[in-house]
Image (spheres, helix red, strand yellow):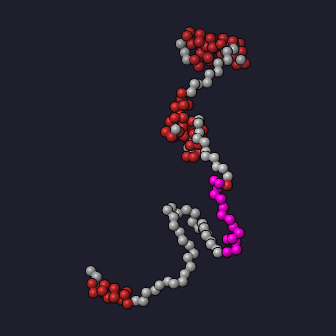
Amino acid sequence: MPDPSLADTDTANAVRRKRRIMTEFVINELSAVDAPAMEGAKMVIMKRHQPALAKELQPMPSINVARKVEPPQAPTDIMDVVAAIAARDSVSKFQAMSLAAVERPDLLAKFQAAPLPPLAKAAPMPPAVAGFNKRIDEIRRRDGCSRIEAMEKARVEHADEFAAYRVA
């Protein structure tokens, strides 16, 4: 245990010491950050009183007065919102669609209520394809095999129809 009498003499010595007060110094750097970034980066602020120059300068108009600023238009299509969210959050369009559904449920409902475009009609099957498919189905029923096995057998049994099937 420390000697309590020494603590008293240390305190007395500290009071007797001459205080050193800094009166002249130069601040080279002053930093206040919440999270360090770009260590070594410098920002300089300089102020100078120049009475002649101050008389010549007129106050600058605000940016909104100098040019008309149009407010950004709100997107009216869910796909525009999805693209904006994907760019903003650096996520896939799939993930952005989920976020867009939360942020803009009104546009999602509008998108879901819109009628689907008509589906394109499939082109009619060429007769050679239809004929060879018919042969495959016949062999499947006859031999009770899979479609692939029936196709292999049809290639051998009906070589002329298979050749037409390949070019169709």
* Residue 73 percent location from the top left of the image: 61, 42
Q: Is residue 125 toward the left or the right of residue 27 in the image?
A: right
Residue 92's image quarter?
top right
* Residue 7 percent location from the top left of the image: 31, 84
Report if residue 82 lies within the magenta region: no
Give, as a single range, the part of the protein colored magenta: 50-65
Q: Residue at x 71, y 69 (%)?
A: 56
Is residue 159 in sight in this rendering?
no
* Residue 96 percent location from the top left of the image: 54, 40
Q: Nearer the viewer, residue 125 or 12?
A: 12
Q: Is residue 77 toward the left or the right of residue 166 in the image?
A: left
153 shown above or below 104: above
47 shown above or below 140: below
* Residue 6 percent location from the top left of the image: 30, 86
Q: Is residue 106 toward the left or the right of residue 61 in the image?
A: left
Q: Nearer the viewer, residue 141 or 122?
A: 122
Is residue 112 in sight in this rendering?
yes
